[in-house]
Structures are given as C-alpha cells and as structure tokens.
Amino acid sequence: MKLPAFAYHRADSLADAVDALAVHGPEARVLGGGQSLLPLMALRMSVPEVLVDISTAADLRHHEVHDGGVTVGAAVTTRTLETDPGVHPLIRSCLARIGHVEIRTRGTVCGSLAHADPAAELPALLLAVEGSVELVAAHGSRVVPAAEFVAGPYTTSIDDGELVAAATLPAIAASAGWSVREIARRSGDFALVGVICVLDVDRSRRCHDARVVLFGVAATAVRATAAEEALLGEIVDGLSVEQAAELAFTGVDVLGDLHGSAEYRRRAGARLVAAALDEAADRAHDTTTSRAAARA
Amino acid sequence: MTLTDGWVGRRVRRSEDPKILLGRGRFVDDVRPTRCLHAAFVRSPVAHATIVATDASEAVQAGATVFTAADLDPLCTPWKGLLDWPGLAAGDQRPLASGKVRHVGEPVAIVVAASRAEAEDAAELVDVEYAELPAVVDPIAALEPGGPLVHDELGANLAFESWFGTKDEHAVDAAFAQATAVVEVAMSTARHTATAMEPRGVLAEYDPVARELTVRISTQAPNMLQSAFAEILGLRENSVRMLTDEVGGAFGMKAHVYPDEIATCAASMLLGRPVSWIQDRAESLQSDTQARDERVRAAIALAGDGTIIGLRSEIVSDGGAYSVYPRSMVTEGIQVSTIMPGPYRVPAYRSHLRVAITNKAPLAVYRAVGHPVAILVMEALLDEAARAVKLDPAELRRRNILKPEELPYTSAAGHVYDSGSHRESLERLVDRIDIGRHAAAARRRGTLLGVGIACFVEVTAPGVAFYGARGAPITAHDQVEVRVEPDGTATVLLGTPGQGQGLHTTAAQVVADHLGIPFDRINVLSGDTRTMPHGTGVWASRSAVVSSGAAAAAAREVKARMLAIAAHLMEVDASDLEIVDGAVRVAGAPDSRIDVAHVAEVAHWRTHQLPDDLQVALAAIGEYRGPNVTFNNGAHGAVVEVDESSGLVRIVDYVCVEDCGVLINPDIVDGQIRGGVAQGVGGALLERLHYDGDGQLLTSTLLDYLLPAAPDLPDIRITHIETPSPTPLGVKGAGEAGAAGAPAAVHNAVNNALAQRGARVWHQPITPERVLRALDEAADRLWPDRSDAPAVPRWTDPESEPECDQPEGDG
Amino acid sequence: MRDTHEPAPVTARVNGRTESAAVAPRTTLADYLRHGLGLTGTHLGCEHGVCGACTVLLDGNPVRSCLTLAVQAHGREVRTVEGLAAPDGTMHPLQERFWRHQALQCGFCTPGFLMAALAAVDEEPDMSRDRIRERLSGNVCRCTGYQPIVDAVEGFSADRAAEHAGEDR
C-alpha cells in the first residue's frame, strides 16, 4: 500500500502555493497535514500528479483568536487549535473528537474542511457557527460562507487553482448554550450520527437562535431546519426539545452504510438531538442565569 | 514426577522482551538481502468470474516482471486440505488463479519490481479481463440445488456434511418428547479474521546452483511449511529452510499454505534472486484466512427441575472458496458441533453440520476454533432455559455442571474431559461478580445493566490422532534440544517457535527446574528449520504442554549425563547426587559439591579424566509424549451497560476464572487470557467482514473492520485454579480460553440487560443498530426495512446421513 | 521551490543524529526510517493511519509516520523507539515499565505504543486509567487486551511524579 509517484512542491508561502497550483492546474493537490489525502493515495483512490505542500508555509501557520472566535491559517493543525485555551469550548470540543491525537497533530483545520467528509466534525462546525472560508488563487481571493462551501460528499466549491487559505469560525453569542454529541462505534471513529447544537435563549428561556447541525447522516453535514424552526420563539423545555428532536430529520435525506442503516441513524439521531438540545439549553440557561446574577 | 519449587510458577519477566522494546526485533520486513526484488499482487476485484484474458505488456514495458498461472503452474503441484474426512470435497488451490477467480482478493498475477512501490505501480498496469459470474454468497442458499457453483467440477457447493453426537438418534427425540421445557435459539456469528498486527510476509531466496530455497516467513508452523513447500515446489526437504525470528501475531491464521507465499517462492525460483512480499492491510483483510462464519439453530430439553435431558443443533458453516492446506475448511464447524455440550451433563445430543463452499476468502482456524460459537449457543440456551423454568442462571448451570467425581467424563459428542474444576470455576466466578457495585453508575447514566456468565471447556494440546492420523504434516511429538556449554550455561533449541506467547521464557523456566541451573544462565533459540529440532508449530493451545514437555525430557536426559560425570569426579554414587542452582551436590550434604561449570568443562575439554565408556555429550533432544488431548476449563462473567438511546454496549466489568493446570508463568497465562478476551469481545461487539450481495468485501481497511481499542475493554480480573492435567508437567493449554468464552459472556450480559425490556439480540457482532432495533421491536415500535440478521438453517430430519468418528480437535 | 518526482534532499535530526539523504517524494517517513536509515523498530501495520504501530515523535509530537512524507521531516526532529534507551543500552523507564508489566506479547505494536504513551505522559502527567485508555485509543494491540499497557503507562507516570516530587524537595 505505497503511495503513487507524484511531483512535490514545498511551498514556503501562500503566494508560492497558489502560483504552483496555477501552474499545475487540476493535476495538483494541496498537501496540508495529509491525514485525509495520504490514506486515499495509499489506497490509490486519489492519484494526484503534483502535491503542493503548504504545511511549512510561514504565512499560513498562525491562527488569530477574536472574542472566542478564531481565524485559522491553512497550515494550522487541529491539535494547535484544540489546545489553545482562548478558543471557544464548542470549537475545542468539536476538534477533540476528530480521530486520535496522532491524527490531530498533523491534520489541519482547513484541510479537513477542504476534504468535506460527510461524517467529519469540521464542516458541521463551520455550518453551526455560520463561519466562512477564504479561498485564494493566483488571480485573487474570495470568501465563501459555510452554507455555500460544501456541495456534496468530498465536494466543495473550491475551484482548480484555489486553496483554503483560512477559515473563520466566529464566536457564538456569549449567552448561547451549545452541545456536541456523537454516536461512534469506538472512540475516534467517524460518527454514525453526530450533532452540534447552538441555542440562545432569553431570561425566560425563550429561544431566539437555534442551530442544529447533523453530520454523518447525509451526503453533507446538514442543518436540521425543521428542528431549528420548531424551537425559534418557543420556550425551551422538555416538551419543545422533544418536539424539535422529532423533527430533526424532516427533509434530511439520510444515508445508511455498513455501520448503520438510515433508519438507525434517524432513530438514534433523534434521541441524540434531544440530548444535545437539553445540554445546550442547560448551558444557555446557566450562562443567562449567571450573567443575570452577576448584574444583580 | 515432581517439580522443584524453583522457576516454574514464577512471574519471571520475559526474555523475549528487551530486544523488541529497544526496537531491535527482527520481523520479516526488517531483513533485506542484496539484489532483493519486491512483489505485489494483482488480485481479483470481484467475487466470481472467468478470467478471459490477461495483458501484462504495459507492466513489463514499465520494467516489471509479471507471472501468471501459466508461468507458475509448471513449478507447483496444486493443493487442498482434505484431512481424510469422509466425503470432504474441495477445489484445488494454486499459487495464482487459473481459469476462474473465486473470491475478492484471490491472487491472479505476481508483479516483481525493484521496490514495492514500483511493483504496485506496475500491478495497476496489468489488464485482466473478467467475465463475471453470479456470486455464491449466502451459505444456506449455496446448498440449494440448481444455483451457481463455486467449483464446477464438484457439482455442488456442499463441501462436507456429518452428524455428530449420541449414537442412538432416537434418544434425543425421546428426551425432547418428555421434556418439561424446550428452548430454541437461532444465532449467528460474523465472519472475522485474526488481524495479526504484523501482516503476512515472505522473503524467498532461491539458490539455483544448490537448488535450495530459504524462506524467511511470518508463520506459526515452520516445519510444517518446510514439508509443504518442498512438496508443492518439488524440492528436497533438506533443501528448504524456513526462518522466523519475531512473528507479529498469528492466532491460527499463519498456519496454512497461502497461494501468495508459494507464488513469491516460485518467483524467486524463476528469477534466481531474492523476492520479498510484504502483505499490506487491504491484502490481509481480503486474503488471510477468515473464521467464525457460523449459523446455528439449537434446542435444549429440560426436566422440571432444570436438568438437561437433551440437546440438538443444526449448523451451517460458511467455508469460503477453498479448503486450506493442511488444516482444511471443516475444523471450525466440527468444533462448533462437538464442543457445544460444554462442561455440562448432556445425556443425549445430536448435531447436524453442513459446510458450504462460497465465493469468500477461505475459512480456517482462528484462536479457539469453533469454541466461541459452540459456547455462545450453549450458554444462550441455558440463559433462555433459566428464564423459561424461572431459575437463576447460575443455579441452572450448577444443577447441570460436571462435578470432580464424574471425571474423566466422555461428552455426548465423544470428547473425553480428562480433568478439571468445572463446578468450582462456576462458584468462584459467581463469588467474584457483584452487579450491585455497578448499579448506581448505571442509574446515573440511565443505562440498562446486565450480567452474563459462560462456562466452558476447551480442547488443548491435541495429539497425533487429529491431523497426523488424517494425513497432514502435523503431529504432536515436538522436539527440544538442551545442551550445556563448557562454562555451564545452557542453550535450548525449540522446535516450536513462538509468535509472542513467551515460549522462550517458559521453556527456560522448565529447563531451569529440570536441569538444576538458574534461569538467567539459559539461552533459548528457535526459528531456523535447518538447525533446530523438529516441531509442528504453535496451534491449539499446545506449546506450553508440548514444547515444555519436550524441554523437560531433554533437560532430564542431560542432567542424568551430568550426574554420571559428577559421580565419577566426586567418587560417589550418581543416585546420591542432585543439581541445585547450578551446583552438583550430595543430597543431604550440601557442602560436598562441585559446580556444574566444572562438570561441563570436564565433559567438553578434560575428557581424559573420565572413563572411556562414560557418555560425555551434554546435549540431548527430548520429545513430547502425552495424552491425546487435555481439556482446560473455566468460566467468564461480564457486566455491561446498554445505552437505550444509541444501542451502544459498554463492558464495565469482566471476570475470568481459568483452570489450565499447573501454571508455568502466571503473568504469561494472564496475558493469554486477557488477549483472548479482547479478541472475543471484538467478535461479540465489533468485528465483521462484510461481504455484500455480490460477494464484494466492504471492509478492506481498518476504518471499516473494527478492532477493539483500549477504551473498549475494562480491566479483566482473573482467578486461577490449578487442577493438574495428566500431561507430563501437569500443564494444560491456555492460549485460547479467553477467546473461547468471551463472546458468550458478553452476549448473555447484553441479553440480560435487554430482557428487562423484553428484548434480545441473536446475532454477533452486537451492533448498536441490532440493539436499538431489538428494543424498539420489543416495544412495538417496528422498523420498516428487513433486519440485517443472516438466515439461520432450518432443522434437517436425521436420515441415514454420513457420520464421523470423534476428532481430537484444534483449539 | 522544489517541484519534481526526483529524490529531494531531506535533512533531519533523527534520535539526536543529523541524517541527510535524497528521498523520493512518495517515500513515507516510516519507509525512510525503516529502509533508508535502517531503523526498523518503527513498524507498519496498516499504512493508512489507523493502527498506530508507526507512531513516532516529530518535534516531540506523536504522528503517524505512514501518513507523513519523509520530505516533510526536513529540518525537523524525529524520535523513534531506537532513540529511547540511554546510549549504553539501558532501557528508558517507560520501556522498563513495559517489560515489568508484560505490556507486550508479539511486540509489533509496541514501538508505536511507547512513542504515543511517552507523548501522552509528557502532556498529561496525571492520567486516570480511563484517560490512559482514551489517550491511547489510536493504537491497536491484538495481543495484550491493553490492561498491562495501561498498567505500564500508569506506573511510568507515577514514577515520574515521584521523581519530580523528589526534585522539588
């Protein structure tokens, strides 16, 4: 299971990388951490002619924390972000669920987004925090919002010659609660069902922002809009959570595989969403009450 | 015989470990001779097809050498494992597929190049045209007449059929007719594979001048392969040399003749250069022997007081495409059938076994061969029976389990249990499990708590009667050479090298006691058939018994020679002498002594001091002699939590009571049990080689074939009972007992939890989906689609079907 | 800057020695260590990043050497199982603990476990047994059932803590 031959370009900057991509066109792939790309190449499911290695490009190796949100350069590893205490716990909690430490040590945040595995945490997180990616090519750059980035399984809006230079994961509202939950056969496995919830409630527990993102269940990570709409404007309690969870898979084209059928994912997923919403609501409530207490 | 209270029984650190820990182990891929070429295989991407044409011209243009069946067949005699079983029918195996491919991963061409990477590049350039045939996937459907055939020349997909059990078939009918309670289960276990961490690998070096073949290979049976390779490749046995240093796990999977390994040797013969083939993991999951693919219907009949009065089983074993040489494809199925009565008094038993040929990788022996399935079915029956007659599961077992005074006991399937502690094992297990301790945590987590127990017997150290008597190059008289060097240290040469079990350490412990010199003065070597004495390898939990037995015999012989020399030097009678801790001394007069080193020096360099007729060679080969089999026994208990919202199962406690007779090194035995339990848990909860309806293997990576990792297992608490066996050292095998009982204990624990909701699961692995579905269905929340449960055979009427003599068994 | 199928120069510190070689880009760090440098203690169990047998330390962090190109180790520090023992061959205390607890059988996965565990204890000196199991969940052992590995890592952590407590005094 050896890698197919390829030409190797070690980029020392973003400009160098996009120049190389421009020269080689569709035959080139960006090598970040390589934790998704290299296994595919070992299995000869991906056979790029050129790898443009950005892992040591100096201007892609930093991240910037702003109010709990973060902008991540393309060469920043998952582990770097995960272990930065300034990063919001929702983000860190998501990152800590990606594979194993040894994978996160090399794997990059932007690389995982670009890979767009339907069961991966990061595309789901991008949706949940309504983040964006910055795509840079030799001829210019553009910012693509989360909702427009992933087009299908392993398919994104990245054009030939572009790379994900940075991703922005904005902070969620300070008053919002959150939850990340997964059902996985073993620790570190891709989730059979995963959910990220962000809930913001006022002091009377009335919901004014609800984001429920499912992953591992469909062709891409997907927002459970029916569940979100069911909660918006409602008082968050056991009943409304249960009703929202039951709607979580409405309109979602759930796919099964050898580890779990679509029916399993829907049934276990609904219960998982309920538990996640409960946890997010509790956290939101905690935050709201503690802020109220601080003001009093 | 007596043992000194010396080295046997001690938790000695393993002598094998330092070099591995320091990164200095030598596995097959760690050795690269000069001018070495590297092989990759073109393997079938489909389950069943005719090979229409093969075009290797592009690969050859790229600089590789490509051999197909047409090139290798003239060098190799085809093979198949038949073992003289009456009626066993199987197709020939060859190094490369000829005419047809019969499973995904079957080798079609060997591609040799300067590096493995280049060989893989070239393999992609070989164009094979296949005409696909309908795949035979379901083993029960495979047996129906009129369907597609895996081997056209056989005329059917039935490889083997037999009835086992009580001779009087009406006794079972009578028992069921008069039973107070009858319980039936229909269960299956999933096809899994050993997944040794070191993949298979061969480094073949053929010397065309001497017509000698040297094969460095990851195997558990070097001498057996020496004979088999010589026969297949038409070489003299003394011209075939098998080398093994470290072997990174085997578990029964590396005890067979594999086409790719023969092809690598043949390539070296054709090229006159060393050829290395190191298997990758996808090849391992596609082409290593597979196991545990069994579907069983079974029923038990009880009297009103819970006494078992009858048992019957109907088994279909999915044997895959070929019957591997030499062990065959039927051993697992036969042991599912014959082990099922377990440690219980079962007065009447009939079992019907059919082994089907399908378009899957060959099924063969894997750690505990058949036992996990047999024990699973029996123990599930007992739990269901306990529910039916409203008895505590332990109490039901207590009423039926063998007592010491009943031993030796001949089971209804014909096995003779020589010794054991069946009843005591159960009692000790029950004492050690405290489910109450876990109740609070389960309540806090909102999970269903369940406890499951399983009692077992296990075939260990089978003798000459099983394989050798059936024509295979496998027997039981393994040999060990012990020699004392001129400085009084000792060298031990094992005919049976290990794959991580610690056989060097245990052999040194035994030799230390039987020779009388300290453990740290003993070096143990193995792994070169040219210089080592003969042995038939590690299998069926035999090495502690067989290899240690032979080592003790050799040590005793050498000791006798040393005593004779010392007697002359000390001018006393040899019968008054003993050797303790490296010194020969007069019994009862410890000050009258000479060092073993002195005796050894005289025996080697100062023989002029000795009479002419005294034997001076301080070296002897010992051989094992013992009973045809010895059974170990014990009991497993698992406590699980089942998450009702996800169906996930977590094992929170695990207890094993094990009686493998005299313990040579308790740490080593504990290691064997824990490792076996881990593999059993893998089978119960995770492992499944998933073939789809077209025979396509969907689990060719470790992302999809799930092995248990550290968080999937709890600490495993072990209790030993030491009931000596009738073997020379009182030892029994221990290598497979963990794997044998774990699937049953875990399964019963899950069903104990699910029973609180009126639910059960019947198929392994116990996936979260199967659990959730069972819970939903028990609550009338039906699922729309068919479940993924495999079909289980219907009862067959016993007619005048073929019947086999009772085998000794492979553990 | 470099853009070729041709071997690329790699200079890395490997177990404290500077090693320079020209390596084909497709060569993984694992294959370079094993066959370029003869450091065969690092093992390949799956070559797709799942089994953990090939784990080495890259600048002190645990990585899969099967999912790292040799050219990506350029200018960096690599530590393998061969770099654990003292120059005189004395085992590293973690190796010693593995020996004592019989935390290996066939030993094929062992080098990966040693490297992963060393990094784990460096980062988290006070892990519970459950945390050790979780932290080592990226390494597969088929022989031991993991318990003795957990024992060894737990023991090594305790040894270190005791040593540090002694230093503080």
Image (spheres, coloured by chain):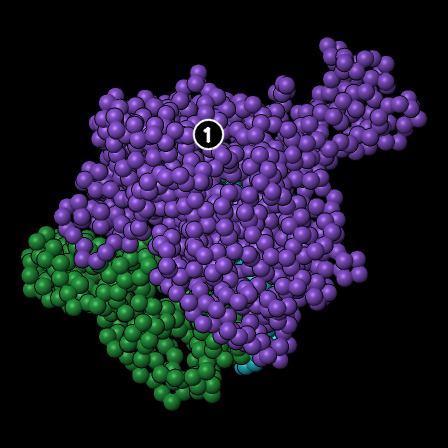
Residue A100 x %, y %: 40, 57
Query: Chain A is shown in which shade?
Result: green
Name the kind of residue labelled 1 in the image.
Answer: Gly
* Identity of the residue furthest to the front in this view: B800
* Identity of the residue furthest to the right in this view: B608
Can residue B701 be seen by looking at this rendering? no
Tell me which chain the residue with mark 1 is part of. B
* Identity of the residue furthest to the top in this view: B588
Q: Which residue is mark 1?
A: B414
Viewer-nearest residue: B624 or C150: B624
Helix, strand or loop for disc 1: loop
Tell me where residue B665 sits by quadrant. top right
Query: Chain B is shown in which shade?
Result: purple
Label 1 crowd (10 A; few <14 / some 14-19 / many >=20): some
Residue drawn at point x = 42 percent, y = 24 percent: B422
Residue C155 x %, y %: 48, 39
Q: Is residue B219 above or below residue B176?
A: below
Viewer-nearest residue: B271 or A215: B271
Viewer-nearest residue: A280 or A171: A280
Q: Which chain gets the cyan colouring?
A: C
Residue drawn at point x = 37 percent, y = 31 percent: B169
Residue drawn at point x = 49 percent, y = 29 percent: B631
Q: Is residue A213 left or right of residue B156?
A: left
